[in-house]
Image: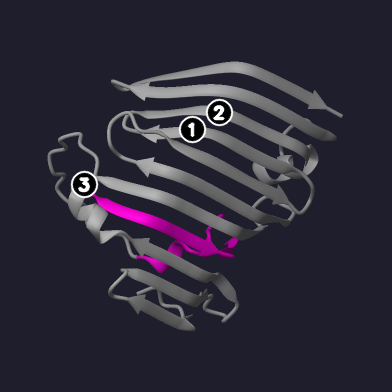
Amino acid sequence: ATGRDAAVQAITFNPFKFHVLIDGFKILEKNQKPFLGFDRLDVKLNLPASVKNLAVVIDEISLNKPKVHLIRDTKGHFNFEDMSKPKPPEQKKPDDGKLFPLQLVKLAISDGQILWDDNALGKPVSEEVNPINLNVKDFNTEPNKTAKLDFNLALKSGGKLAWQGDIGVNPILSNGGIRLDKSQLQKLAKLALPDSMPFQIQGDGLLNIDYKIGLENKKLTVTVKKSRLELK
């Protein structure tokens, strides 16, 4: 139990197509202000393919307009810390190194929003991340399988982040490019750095990186194939 009020407008389930729709989900703060929610969650499970491939095969997971309001108080506590109680430590089971068999044809998050209020840095700082969009195609936990990733977001204070590339989890790898454009460095510094830092960061920044990351046999390799940094 979260100790907070939650509500759902509608839940629709088609047992023949294994299709689930959840509309209008929300969780409120204890003061009844919005904390977390989304407009629609759409999940389509492919049962015949799951049986055939001996894996969970999901044709689509789509999340429309998810929204979360994160708050950190003057003591450094977040507004979600009281939602779950710590569990007693459990005895770890032997890990055979195999990943759960999962195939996800399409994952889409559209028009996401994060509201951030930080009261622990001396002067209160607020930021809004909107929209947040994520698209992943052909995710698979089988060995040597890669998925296509397209992720982008925008800051209300200025600045956009775009990340495109290939990703894999067996082994862990990623190959692609990241672009951070027109970001206000002073605002980002306030969010990330304490007021006591002996220097100030100002201006706009542009960053382009083409990279390759791999993790195999517990060895991490990072290669920057091309990079560009501009400060204005």
Q: Name the one closer to the observer, 206 or 145.
A: 145
Callout 3, which amino acid?
Asn
CB atoms of marks 2 and 1 within 8 Å = yes
Q: CA distance from mark 2 to mark 3?
A: 29 Å
Mark 3 or 1, nearer chain start: 3
Instruction: Name the residue at 35% across, 33% down.
Output: 145
Q: Name the one closer to the observer, 100 or 138.
A: 138
Callout 1, which amino acid?
Asp
Query: Magenta residues?
Result: 55-84
Instruction: Name the residue at 57% across, 64% down.
Output: 68
Residue 51, image x and y in percent? 18, 54
Mark 2 or 3, nearer chain start: 3
**What residue is shown with label 3?**
53
Q: Name the one closer to the observer, 87 or 27.
A: 27
Residue 82 painted magenta: yes
- Tell which tag, 2 or 3, sits nearer the viewer: 3
Residue 176 numbered tag? 2
Q: Quadrant of the N terminus?
A: bottom left
